[in-house]
Amino acid sequence: MKQFSITVPIQELDYAELSDQDKHLVDVAKEMTSSSYAPFSRFHVGAAILLDNGEIVRGSNQENAAFPSSLCAERTACYQASALFPGVPMKKIAIAAAAEHSSDKSQSPGLTFQPLPISPCGACRQALLEYEHLYGPIEVILYGHSKTYILPSVSSLLPLAFTDF
Ligand code: THU
């Protein structure tokens, strides 16, 4: 029998320690939380993808009364990126999330950013991995109000992934 481990390199940083490029991408992801349509979960997620041509493509979660028809911010962003700029590699994705802090539904809610980074769901990891296999590593920046994680690739978030048949 052989045993092996898979380790995931994660950089933990404060927002202030990010490069200017990463700060900007995180800022766009944070901004995008306010375009989220999340009347059911009241959890607002924003994503921003930096492309090799310098474009930043944005996404936010879009919910639906038929719950499974909803789409996460990360897939909204990567499908939009591939649709708008087919063949252009995706270099980095930043993700931010905010919860509503008012329970009064008659008022438009304020948003509070999550203190800890949130990480993409399994389906989003799989979707992002498809583009990573086409174009090479996509760095993943997971923003949290108190700390931010940077991972070198989507595959580091999804080891032993299904990629081919
Ligand atoms: N959501 C995302 O958009 N991205 C994630 O990484 C996790 C979850 C959305 C889906 C749903 O609209 C809400 O957040 C609560 O799960």
Image (cartoon, rainbow, N blue to C red):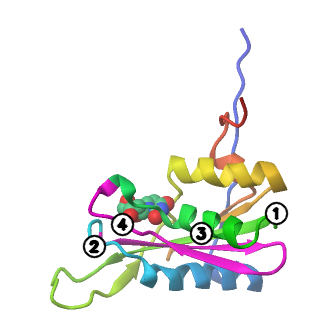
- Tell me the residue that label 4 is attached to: 63
Q: Secondary structure at mark 3?
A: helix
Ligand 1 under 8 Å from disc 3 Cβ: no
Seen from the viewer's position, the closer of residues 76 and 159 is 76
Give the residues drawn in magenta, as a range. 42-67
- Tell me the residue that label 1 is attached to: 87
Spatial CA span between label 3 and label 1: 15 Å
- Tell me the residue that label 3 is attached to: 77
Would you say the residues marked 2 and 4 are in contact, meaning their CB atoms lie under 8 Å apart?
A: yes
Residue 115 horizontal/vertical position (percent): 45, 72
Ligand 1 under 8 Å from disc 4 Cβ: yes
Q: Which quadrant of the figure has residue 140?
A: bottom right
> At label 1, which amino acid type do we have?
Gly
- Tell me the residue that label 2 is attached to: 39
Report the residue at 27% width, 86% height from top.
Answer: 109
Q: Is residue 44 found inside the magenta-colored segment of the image?
A: yes
Seen from the viewer's position, the closer of residues 147 and 125 is 125
Spatial CA span between label 2 and label 1: 34 Å
26 sits left or right of 2 in the view: left
Camera sees residue 9: no
Q: Is residue 8 above or below residue 39?
A: above
Dot 2: within a 10 Å radius of its alpha carbon, few (fewer than 14), some, or many (20 or more) residues? Answer: few
Ligand 1 under 8 Å from disc 2 Cβ: no
Residue 116 horizontal/vertical position (percent): 48, 66
